[in-house]
Image (cartoon, grey):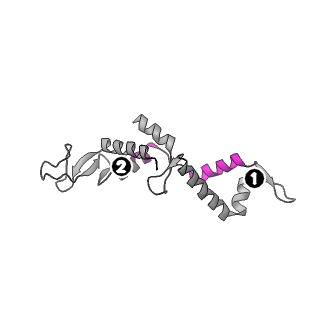
Amino acid sequence: MNTEIQKKLTELAYKKTIPFCYGDYIECPKGVCPKCGSDDLMRFLPGVGVEYGTAWVIKHILSEGLASVDLDEAFENSMRDCYPETTTIGFLKDYDTVNAMKELDPVGWRCAQADWESFEANDGNIISFDNGATYYQVSDIEGLIEEI
């Protein structure tokens, strides 16, 4: 994972949230609860909620500011760039190459897509903050950070 992006997003999450004492249910902008003296504080994101940590804040910022990558569509477009538009199968007419690959070998297609996703993530083109459930373009995240 790109640690520089993670660091910037964490900083952004701290800027957008307010320390919050759940025990006394008050905001603690100075980092210590004025009532109980606790420094074990949650983060409060106005209009969204309260929770420990910043991962949930980062997820919210990304989901509100960016569209996630449609991996199926992106992989299909990548394959369309690599292979001819149509393919002749035997004596039959020409078929759309990508559709033929998907329909004739769906397991191979899914395996190739999984490999492609791994390569894209390792090359730093896409990034996930929820163990691969949602991916975002790194360039889009960098643009969002600069914008905010």
| Residue extending farthest top | 147
Q: Position of residue 6 (x, y in %)?
A: 41, 46
The image quadrant that residue 99 belongs to is bottom right
Does residue 134 appear to the left or right of 119 in the view shown?
left
Query: Based on the displayed image, in which of its 4 quarters is residue 89 positioned?
Result: bottom right
From where the camera sits, is residue 64 visible? no
Q: Where's residue 52, x and y in %?
A: 29, 55
For residue 96, side relative to residue 78 (left or right): right
For disc 1, the marked residue is 96
Element type at marker 2? helix
CA distance separating discs 2 and 1: 43 Å
Residue most toward the left? Answer: 35
Which percent across, then down, holds residue 11?
34, 42
Number of marks in the rendered image: 2
Report the front residue among 69 and 49: 69
Mark 1 residue element: strand
For marks 2 and 1, give the one nearer the viewer.
2
In terms of sequence position, does the residue under pointer 2 or pointer 1 come before the other? 2
Q: Nearer the viewer, residue 121 or 99?
A: 121
Q: Amino acid at mark 1?
A: Asp
Where does residue 40 sit, x and y in percent of width and height? 21, 54
Q: Which residue is depicted at the point 44% across and 42% down?
A: 65
Identify the magenta region: 60-84
- Asked if residue 78 is among those painted magenta in the image, a careful observer would answer yes
| Badge number at residue 57 | 2
